[in-house]
Amino acid sequence: MLTKLFFAGDLMCGRGIDQVLPQRGDPAIHEAYAQHAGDYVRLAEQKNGKIPTTVDYSYPWGVALAALAERRPHVRLVNLETSLTCRGEPRPHGLHYRMNPANMGILKVAEIDCCSLANNHVLDWGEAGIRDTLEVLDKHGIHRSGAGLDAAEAEAPAILPLPVANACWCSPMPPPTAVWMRNALPAPASRALPGCPTYRPRPCVTLRSASVPASALATWWSCRCIGAATGISRYTKRRLASPVI
């Protein structure tokens, strides 16, 4: 039986998108060129015409939902680059994405099965933001990998059922020298990063074997972690992708 997988990234549901969803959150943003998320709605309208004040959860997906319905993938996975929170303090890096957790319908309408959190926006809103994101995904029954409240949780793969077996999904992280790779594990002040005193980097996560047939084992590499930052060659990426194909 052919197993069909859907991969997407980066998925950003904050800023202007959050402002047109049924349960819009705080519109304040902290960017050098915009301080109100509604500014992005107006920019989109200048390019594409009037956008309804409030849209349903299928609207931001455009034609993608019809394409998914036609292809009927068995598993749907995204790289979620948005904190699911109404709390937290913006980290000092210039771009901060968050969505009101009450708008989780945007993930549910697309029937997303798993979210990779191994990206540079998972801690946009600090420890409160990551705690809420993890809790919201768990509450809605969406698998996750790539981030957690301790090393074991952050490194644990997500195990998803498939028609013929299970698939093991890991979200690798970049080298520990990357400034944006920080997790919610408290660290001594002597090891803290500048501007982020309660977080520390960890070594990158490596692929682990799983007790499932090789044909059913697929590794989902977060799109932020493929390329020059990780030093992975094109040949290696093709080899790693072969179980998916």
Image (cartoon, helix red, strand yellow):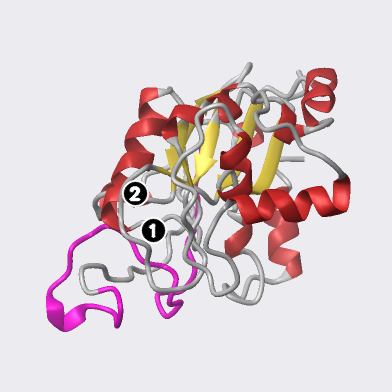
Instruction: Answer above or below: position of 8 versus 195.
Output: above
Locate residue 146, reporting x and y percent: 43, 50
Return the x and y of residue 83 as percentages of the image width and height. Answer: 44, 47
Q: Nearer the viewer, residue 97 or 48?
A: 48
Answer whether residue 186 is magenta in the image. yes
The answer to whether the residue labelled 2 contacts the one labelled 1, judged by CB atoms less than 8 Å apart, is: yes
Towards the viewer: 190 or 197: 197
The magenta-colored residue range is 167-196
Q: CA distance from mark 2 to mark 1?
A: 6 Å
- In the image, which disc is placed on residue 123? 1
* Residue 209, horizontal then vertical, whole percent: 47, 45
Q: Amino acid at mark 2?
A: Ile
Q: Which mark is residue 14?
A: none
Q: Rate crowding at label 2 as few (under 14), some (14 to 19) or many (20 or more) other CA atoms within 10 Å.
A: many
Task: Quadrant for residue 223, please give it.
Answer: bottom right
Q: Is residue 145 rendered to the left or right of residue 73?
A: left
